[in-house]
């Protein structure tokens, strides 16, 4: 490493996800020279994987009328079990509506309110007013008194990241991707930048800055199973802690999301439950009604996660080689609105109601385009029960015309029906994918 090769800038931002790029944009708009370091190209940051949405008290939809920052603040404090910094929470709830509308101005294609009457999966009828037509739509998410989650179908993080990165490019912000910050440059009192490793050629280079921002995301990859990308290893926190002068706070604040595909650990958006999905045990019993009769599947994520673990420990999980799991059932969420909102999971929605006891095995492959390389798919194919009419070679490609009418349970399980109608050949086997 040569100090003569040092890169000089006003603001050094480590991390190119939504948080890092938003900081860079604000600094660049105020006339500062900004440089971003990122392990991957910005549009491959883990922010892109976010599906469900972001909350802002707009009050645009029927189930959100009367919403305001005070109600949002109360939900936030309660959802944190009174552990959050309330000054930060207040700032967040006041600025969230501004940020959502600003992102719309930058090009985010938020889903919009469609006026008219519709029936929710739980039977409640709501009517969206004509005067609200075209405003930013909002969906139900866990732990909220009002519907306030703004979304773009189920690809919210994707469109947010792309819009944000377009603004970064427009402002001429310097981005050095495939670069990892390995140490901070400091004198024990002030930070002067970072030493970075080029992942292209292995060279080290110092970056000197008047201010350094660390926005490297979480550290979910320290867990055996995580929905986080492989780059979420907490490297930003590690280099801060390595200085010996920067403490880390609230390390217990790790969010456990209730739903992910077994065994791949791919996130299944909370929108599936927000739009009416049910959690079922091995007896196809909707157990959240027993624990949370009011909020049901849309209680706070930590609450739902704890009840799921509790239910599994009672011996009511579905057994598999990967350990017990539970079902996420979205067969009933087949209305056009749900199909439009859950685009990545539309193959899990029913095209026709299956007869009682019919195996909804199509879901075993409906989700596999997300699983690469192809060896996991081949493994599941090999476990397919080799019975007449169910030959290995008749197993369809994920991109072939859909030959099976029954879809909906986000796994290869059986539709509810008389026990006698379920056969071991159609419903058994450890090849199932579930949520």
Image (cartoon, rainbow, N blue to C red):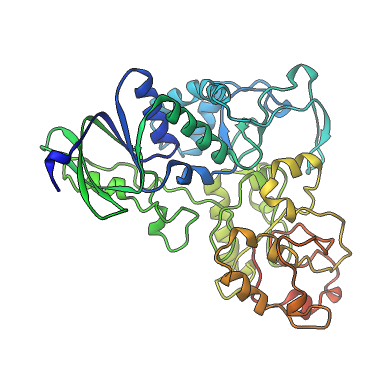
Residue 64 percent location from the top left of the image: 67, 26
* Residue 299 appears left or right of 277: left
The vertical placement of 248 against 389, above or below, is above
* Residue 257 appears left or right of 400: left
Q: Is residue 435 visible?
A: no
Q: Residue furthest right?
A: 355
Residue 216 percent location from the top left of the image: 36, 43
The vertical placement of 425 against 154, above or below, is below
Q: Is residue 25 visible?
A: yes
Residue at the image point whose x is 43% and y is 41% from the top: 42
Residue 238 percent location from the top left of the image: 26, 49
Residue at the image point whose x is 78% and y is 43% from the top: 122
Q: Which quadrant, please, contains the C terminus? A: bottom right
* Residue 326 appears left or right of 85: right
Q: Quadrant of residue 107?
A: top right
Instruction: State the count of labels.
Output: 0
* Residue 7 appears left or right of 427: left
Residue at the image point whose x is 10% and y is 37% from the top: 187
Q: Residue furthest left?
A: 187
Of residues 17 and 136, the one drawn nearer to the viewer in this rendering: 17
Residue 154 percent location from the top left of the image: 63, 42
Q: Quadrant of residue 106?
A: top right
Q: Residue furthest bottom?
A: 387
Of residues 2 and 108, the one drawn nearer to the viewer in this rendering: 2
């Amino acid at each position: 490493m040569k100090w003569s090769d040092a890169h000089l800038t006003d603001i050094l931002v480590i991390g190119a996800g939504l948080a890092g790029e938003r900081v860079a944009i604000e600094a660049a708009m105020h006339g500062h020279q900004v440089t971003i370091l990122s392990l991957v190209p910005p549009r491959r940051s883990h922010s892109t994987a976010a599906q469900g949405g972001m909350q802002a008290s707009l009050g645009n939809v029927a189930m959100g009328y009367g919403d305001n920052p005070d109600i949002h603040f109360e939900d936030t404090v309660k959802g944190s079990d009174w552990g959050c910094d309330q000054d930060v929470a207040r700032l967040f709830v006041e600025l969230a509506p501004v940020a959502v509308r600003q992102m719309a101005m930058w090009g985010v294609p938020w889903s919009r309110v469609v006026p008219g009457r519709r029936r929710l999966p739980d039977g409640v009828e709501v009517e969206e007013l004509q005067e609200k037509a075209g405003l930013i739509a909002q969906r139900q998410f866990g732990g909220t008194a009002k519907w306030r989650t703004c979304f773009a179908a189920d690809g919210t993080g994707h469109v947010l990241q792309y819009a944000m990165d377009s603004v970064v490019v427009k402002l001429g912000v310097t981005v050095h991707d495939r670069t990892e910050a390995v140490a901070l440059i400091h004198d024990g009192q002030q930070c002067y930048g970072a030493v970075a490793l080029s992942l292209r050629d292995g060279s080290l280079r110092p970056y000197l800055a008047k201010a350094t921002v660390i926005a490297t995301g979480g550290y979910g990859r320290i867990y055996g199973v995580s929905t986080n990308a492989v780059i979420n290893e907490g490297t930003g926190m590690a280099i801060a802690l390595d200085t010996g002068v920067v403490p880390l706070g609230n390390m217990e604040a790790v969010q456990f999301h209730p739903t992910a595909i077994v065994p791949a650990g791919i996130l299944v958006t909370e929108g599936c439950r927000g739009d009416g999905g049910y959690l079922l045990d091995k007896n196809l019993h909707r157990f959240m009604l027993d624990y949370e009769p009011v909020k049901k599947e849309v209680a706070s994520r930590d609450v739902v996660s704890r009840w799921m673990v509790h239910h599994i420990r009672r011996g009511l999980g579905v057994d598999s080689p990967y350990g017990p799991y539970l079902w996420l059932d979205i067969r009933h969420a087949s209305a056009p609105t749900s199909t439009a909102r859950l685009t990545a999971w539309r193959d899990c929605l029913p095209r026709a109601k299956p007869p009682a006891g019919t195996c909804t095995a199509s879901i075993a492959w409906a989700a596999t385009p997300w699983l690469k390389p192809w060896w996991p798919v081949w493994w599941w194919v090999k476990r397919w029960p080799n019975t007449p009419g169910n030959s290995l070679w008749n197993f369809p490609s994920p991109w072939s015309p859909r030959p099976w009418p029954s879809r909906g349970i986000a796994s290869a399980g059986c539709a509810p029906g008389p026990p006698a109608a379920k056969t071991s050949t159609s419903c058994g086997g450890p090849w199932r994918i579930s949520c």
